[in-house]
Image (spheres, rainbow, N blue to C red):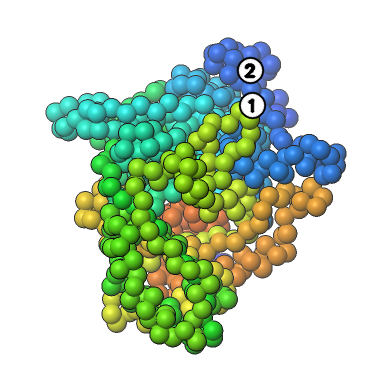
Amino acid sequence: MKASGAASLFGLRPRRLFASTAIRRVRPSDPGWPSKEAWKRLNDAVDGNLIPVEFPINACLSSSLSTDCKAFFANVKNPYYIGDNPGITQTLGWVDAWETKPSVYAVAARNADDIAAAVNFARENNLRLVIKGGGHSYQGTSNAPDSLLIWTRHMHDVTIQNDFVARGCKSTFAPQRAVTVGSGTIWLQAYDAVTTKVGAYVQGGGCTTVGVAGLIQSGGFGSFSKHYGMAAAGLLEAEVVTADGKVRIANACTNSDLFWALKGGGGGTFGVVSKLTLRVRDLPELAGGASFTVKASSDDAYRRLIRHYVGFYREALFNDHWGEQAHFSPDNKLEIRMVYLGLDTEESRKVWQPFLNWLAQSSTAYTIEAEPEIGSMPFRHWWDVDWSKERHRDVFKADSRSSASPINVWWNGDAGQVGWVVWGFESLWMPASLLQDDSQEKLANALFSASRFSKVELHFNKGLAGAPSEAIEAAKGTAINPSVCAAFALAIVAAGQGPAYPGIPNHEPDAEKGRKAADAVHRCMNELRTVASNSGAYVSESNFFESGFEQSYWDTNHARLAQIKKKYDPDGLFFVHNGVGSEQWTPDGFTRL
Ligand SMILES: Cc1cc2nc3c(=O)[nH]c(=O)nc-3n(C[C@H](O)[C@H](O)[C@H](O)COP(=O)(O)OP(=O)(O)OC[C@H]3O[C@@H](n4cnc5c(N)ncnc54)[C@H](O)[C@@H]3O)c2cc1C
């Protein structure tokens, strides 16, 4: 009784608070769908860059054994093939949540004017609009059937400036080194220009094929964020087309509210970003990695291993040198996949020696399955494809298409997620208070209990506790959940399978297995929630079914984001699943409630 009473009261609230006129977007089958002539006018306005969107999976409709279908399932393991194709997305779907669907038309935008034409056309014709950059949304927020797509893939110019001053900021900020990128740029293109070619640093994401615009708008963390902070905090200026079709500049001095919302308020929500200018920093001489796997011989030994690692992490690794991950698995394995900056090989090995000695002293309890690889390299070559090739540094997979740019590469470690179908995915920021002496036991126990259900990944570079105060202060100036500043890591638990699509024989997602895995992911994360309740999740890497997403993603920042959304997009032209303002729409974004 009580529950149902509360629910009905709750059901009334949104309508009262957000009294709105009914809006229903049109589909191709509706009489209000734009005429051929209207589409032609849009095509003329965007210099012929309006394209009908093909759906490559259609090659499998006649037979999954056809040559074209086989070619599709081979190609879909290449993120550049996916990215070059407006009809599909890097994640192909999520069991019981969504599957990738093509838009009807796409504007393959070349500049802000093309974007403005598309925005005006969508608004005037009441179309469902969707925006795609790198196409890496796990939550399917860059695809929608029956929609018009703004596709920024071709907008990837990268320009470095030594004395950038954001517009209107001349009297407030000194000129600084910066890089301006088109909003379709992916991170490897930015790293190639800034680090490989110039020997400087821009804070971006870990995965090389993620889009700059999507990552910045969700906050964004890269391998070295424990030192440089969030990618969004490095945003100096954005050029944005808002729902009224205006091309605006957003920075600390002009449209500063919109600027703040773009720094972590979620992609596809406040406007279409056409250009971004990011801070460029000096590059340390060295970076490196530490990687090995240990298997414990029993549950008890594994408990001790986790407990010891937690203490060791606090002592030796909880600082701005060390980022990336440690994994805790049901098969009692601890996998170390960490990176560092600013240490030479000898220094980094010295850091790990006490831990390796401890393992060696208990050699009956612990087997080193993958021998420790700990070593440094010149940071300038971290993303340098030629340098890696010459030294047989086997870290990248390459785009083998004949037309491919030589820098079309992706990390071996990300290959498993190309064309992925998600079964379950949850994240949780882990407060640094858990590393205090009297809490380490509690944390270790929770990690052990969680690891009984599924593999737990701690991403240390996605929590900013331990980072320099400048990085933490800069993060406080973004819209992301402030919990990130007090977290030593983001815990991620996820499961999925390789390329699959519903209705394609022999390539169906394994829904039954997927549901079981999603349940295991949830139970696993619940064990961590016993020690880190309400600390929030990272909008871009979280559950499609995130409960209380407003609080989870943005916490105290949500109210301000909702106001900014109302100001720049009062009619909700920009809708994404679990985005700011999305609660006013049906799940497909077609009907305002
Ligand atoms: C394999 C993989 C690895 C990842 N690794 C990391 C990581 O290391 N660190 C991290 O922080 N995150 C990571 N992520 C998450 C990633 O940052 C987000 O999914 C991000 O939003 C993807 O951006 P995108 O442009 O590639 O994707 P898209 O799907 O194209 O866009 C994501 C969202 O942003 C919107 N958007 C895109 N372009 C624009 C634009 N120009 N203007 C307005 N809205 C736009 C889209 O509409 C969509 O809602 C990873 C994701 C994957 C799949």
> Which residue is painted at 68% across and 40% down in the image?
75
Which type of secondary structure does the marked residue at label 2 adopt?
Answer: helix
Quadrant of residue 47 in the image?
Answer: top right
In the image, is 70 to the left or to the right of 251?
Answer: right
Which type of secondary structure does the marked residue at label 1 adopt?
Answer: strand
In the image, is 191 to the left or to the right of 251?
Answer: right
Give the residue at mark 2.
39
Q: Is residue 225 visible?
A: no
> Which residue is painted at 51% across and 29% down in the image?
152
Give the residue at mark 1.
105
Q: Dividing the image into 4 quarters, which one contains the C terminus?
A: top right
Q: Which mark is residue 338?
A: none
Would the CB of label 2 be found within 8 Å of ligand 1?
Answer: no
Q: Dividing the image into 4 quarters, which one contains the N terminus?
A: bottom right
Q: CA distance from mark 1 to mark 2?
A: 9 Å
Q: Residues within 10 Å of mark 2 (few under 14, many from 20)?
A: some
Q: Position of residue 116 (x, y in %)?
A: 47, 22
In the image, is 376 to the left or to the right of 455?
Answer: left
Kind of residue indicated by mark 1: Tyr
Q: Position of residue 579 (x, y in %)?
A: 48, 46
> Which residue is painted at 43% across and 55% down in the image?
538
> Which residue is painted at 72% across and 48% down in the image?
501
Camera-nearest residue between 190 and 105: 190
In the image, is 413 to the left or to the right of 251?
Answer: right
Q: Position of residue 309 (x, y in %)?
A: 39, 75
Specify which label sits upstream in the sequence, 1 or 2.
2
Kind of residue indicated by mark 2: Trp
Quadrant of residue 246 in the image?
Answer: top left
Q: Residues within 10 Å of mark 1 (few under 14, many from 20)?
A: many
